[in-house]
Structures are given as structure tokens and as C-alpha cells.
Image (cartoon, rainbow, N blue to C red):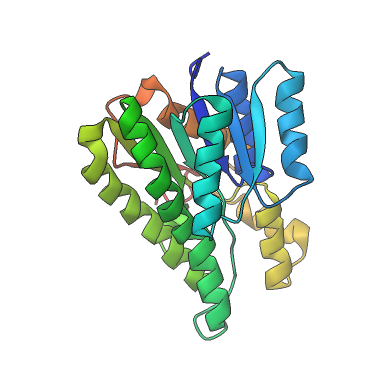
Amino acid sequence: MRLHGRVALITGGASGIGRATALLFARQGAAVAVVDLDEVAGPAVVGAMVDEGGRAIFVPCDVTEAADCQHAVEQTVRDLGGLDVLLNAAGIIRRATVLETTEAEWDQVMAVNVKSVFLLSKYAIPVMAESGGGVIVNVSSGWGLVGGPRAAAYCASKGAVVQLTKSMALDHGRQNIRVNCICPGDTDTPMLRDEARQLGEPMEQFLAEAAERPLGRIGRPEDIAEGALYLASDASSFVTGTALVVDGGGIAG
């Protein structure tokens, strides 16, 4: 029970990495606020946690809107009694070059992937500081550290998340707030499968190519969730400002 007695807010918690992390955090003793736009899958995740004896709530939220983000933090504090861990897992991808990307697509990717981290952190940090500290874990990507083809907006956004993480770690360490990010490689989520559709590639071929890394497979959401648990728990009590790569060796060489 590495998160016993703590309260976590997880964006993008209805699916993929966010869902896997929400379920793991609940099993590790945390009360969890699942924050997402999906008002069907989100409550289902909460129901699964409650069925296992956990405490959880669903908060519908557009993470690109300041009022929604502020409300999500306030409802978490009100209903669950505080806020100790913020996991910014909401994200989207657009597989396109700069020339292929429209201005609207660029703005949407940057809003969901970067602005959301800024907004949730802006409202969470004062709550954490007042209670003596906390942890923020941002989900970046291996492509936040190295470039990738036909993913200009996505790579730019995830690189921004890495640098925003480092900046917040410097600014808020004295408030006992640790800020780290996790950089997954290809992980079997709905977003990964949507990439194949965007690129017009056969799904099996796309997934096989994604598995071409030293460990010979694509990641599972649970693999990434375990990394997030490490960063959220006291096991990483002297770790802040870092980018933890969990990608089966994909960018190792």
C-alpha cells in the first residue's frame, strides 16, 4: 500500500495509461479522482475501483479549459479530503508533418498535451503547498526526448512537457513538491491504434513495427503505471526534475 491515505487526481483516467494508473493507485491505497471527458468510461473505471473497496470519484473535465481544471481540483479536495498526487496523463496525437498539420490541429495538440499540464498544476500546487507538499507526475513521451517522423506537433508538445516539468521542479522544490515526468515508448492504448489509422497503415504491421525495440514488444499500460507509481511514492523521495524513460529500450541507441 505505497500510497495509503493519499489522494490522487488523474487526467485522462478513463482509458489507456491514465486508466491503468488509476486502478494501480487505488490498489496501492490512494483515493482517486478520475478526470476525463468520457462520461461513460470514466464512471466505469470509478465503479471498478469502488467494487474493490477503493474510494474514487469521476469528474467530467475539459483539460484545456481553466474553469474545468480549477473545478476538478476543488471537487477532488472537497470530496476526497485533499490532493497529494497529480498525474497529468491526458493526451492526443496527430501524425503529420508541419506541412500537413493545420493551425487548428496544432493548437489542439498543444492545448491537450501542454496547456492542460500548466492549468492543472496551477490549481493543484497551492493546495499541495498548503498541506505540506505533494507530487506531480506528467506523462511525456520518448518523442519528447528524440524526434519522430510525421509527428511535428506531438513531438513539440511532449518536449515542452519535459521542460515544463524541469522548470516546475526548480520552482516548487522548496515547497516539498516533487515534479517529474515519465516518457513512455509505444504502448498498447487506443491512442497507439489511432496512429495506425491516421497513417493509413495495416494495424498488425504497425504494431509489429512498434515492437521492434530491444525488449521485442510494445508496452502495456500497466508497465507505464508502475513507473508512475514509483514517481508518485516515497520510493522516489529524492527524485525531482527527471524524465523517466519506460520504453523497452526504444531510444537507447
Q: Is residue 188 above or below residue 43?
A: below
Residue at 49% x, 81% y is 98
Q: Is residue 148 left or right of residue 161?
A: right
Q: Is residue 171 visible?
A: yes
Q: Is residue 204 above or below residue 156?
A: above
Residue at 51% x, 26% y is 7
Residue at 60% x, 56% y is 62
Q: Is residue 120 above or below residue 106?
A: above
Q: Is residue 148 visible?
A: no
Picture quarter containing residue 240? top left
Picture quarter containing residue 126? top left
Estimate the x, y position of residue 203 in percent, counting from the top left: 76, 60
Disc tally is 0
Estimate the x, y position of residue 253 in percent, counting from the top left: 39, 52
Estimate the x, y position of residue 226 in percent, counting from the top left: 53, 29
Q: Is residue 239 left or right of residue 187?
A: left
Residue at 43% x, 29% y is 84
Estimate the x, y position of residue 41 in percent, counting from the top left: 76, 43
